Image (cartoon, rainbow, N blue to C red):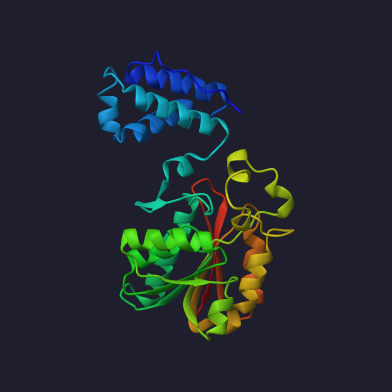
Amino acid sequence: MHTQLDWSDVATIREALTRASSFLREQGAKDPLFEAELLIRHSLGWDRTRFLTSMNDSINPQVVQQLAALCQRRATHEPLQYMMGTQEFYGRPFVVRPGVLIPRPETEILVEQVLLRASALWGEDAALFAADIGTGSGAICITLACERPQWQVATVDLSSDATRIAKENAERLGAHVRFMQGDLVQPLLEAGEKVDILVSNPPYIPSSDVEELDKEVRLYEPRLALDGGQDGLVCYRRLCEALPELLKPKALVAFEVGIHQAGDVAELLRQSGVIDEVDIVCDLAGIERVALGTRK
């Protein structure tokens, strides 16, 4: 535990930035200046322009106290997104709290590929049924529903916490999504529903690797959303086994995958017997990030 910080001598925005960034640097923050700015702006409710033009302005002692408390929380590796309560995804702000995985920028590539491939397969105006397996914060299903309001979008998650937060996000962002609670595609199979598009960013980290993750992920984000079983492929196997029962005659399957998993997941898609074409898409770092299967 860290002792209470005494920053009573901090009088201006600039001094607050210096003190907060120095403290965060001592605690091992990767980008202390950026984090300090973010926490100050959050404490003040300011945008970046106002912050940068007010560096010599005085700062309220109560705001300094709030900032010090936030810095102490950050020193325990609590994710900034949980501290501030939001994370942007595909240009929209999503509420995130403990209990849901924080949306990653790489997952935007998954959504982008679904939108691109669906337009190529069916045209932009087609009324399709898309199911997102593993709701989390709702980043994927809500983005699809907002970008393609003519689609029916359903989503399934085992976690009641995640479902509750995702529903809150859907309401805030005006997205029409059908929420289902259950284990992977089980609710869809039980209802006898078939989908045009199946999209998922399932847990894919091998169980033995979970303990090696950065502290802010390992200590704070839900293990249920991270642990993909012994080899990280458990969910992909189950999803691919269900494809013959789940897909319409013409369909698209899109999965986010972990490092070195794309080839294995592509093979699982082929082994389902209902996928005609498999593609792999890399992220901006050149890492194979999305596996796509098309049934034509």
The image shows residue 138 at horizontal and vertical percentages of: 45, 61
Q: Quadrant of the N terminus?
A: top right
The image shows residue 59 at horizontal and vertical percentages of: 31, 21
State which quadrant residue 16 falls in.
top left
The image shows residue 81 at horizontal and vertical percentages of: 46, 43
State which quadrant residue 243 falls in.
bottom right
Compared to residue 163, the image places residue 100 above or below, namely above
Q: Is residue 274 visible in the rendered structure shown here?
A: no
Compared to residue 231, the image places residue 23 above or below, namely above
The image shows residue 266 at horizontal and vertical percentages of: 62, 66
**Residue at the spot 65% in from the left edge and 61% down from the top edge:** 263
State which quadrant residue 277 falls in.
bottom right
Residue 274 placement, left or right of 126: right
Residue lying farthest to the top in this orientation: 9
**Total label count?**
0
Q: Is residue 45 visible in the rendered structure shown here?
A: yes
**Residue at the spot 46% in from the left edge and 40% down from the top edge:** 83
Residue in front for this viewpoint, 41 or 185:
41
**Residue at the spot 55% in from the left edge and 55% down from the top edge:** 289
Compared to residue 3, the image places residue 267 above or below, namely below
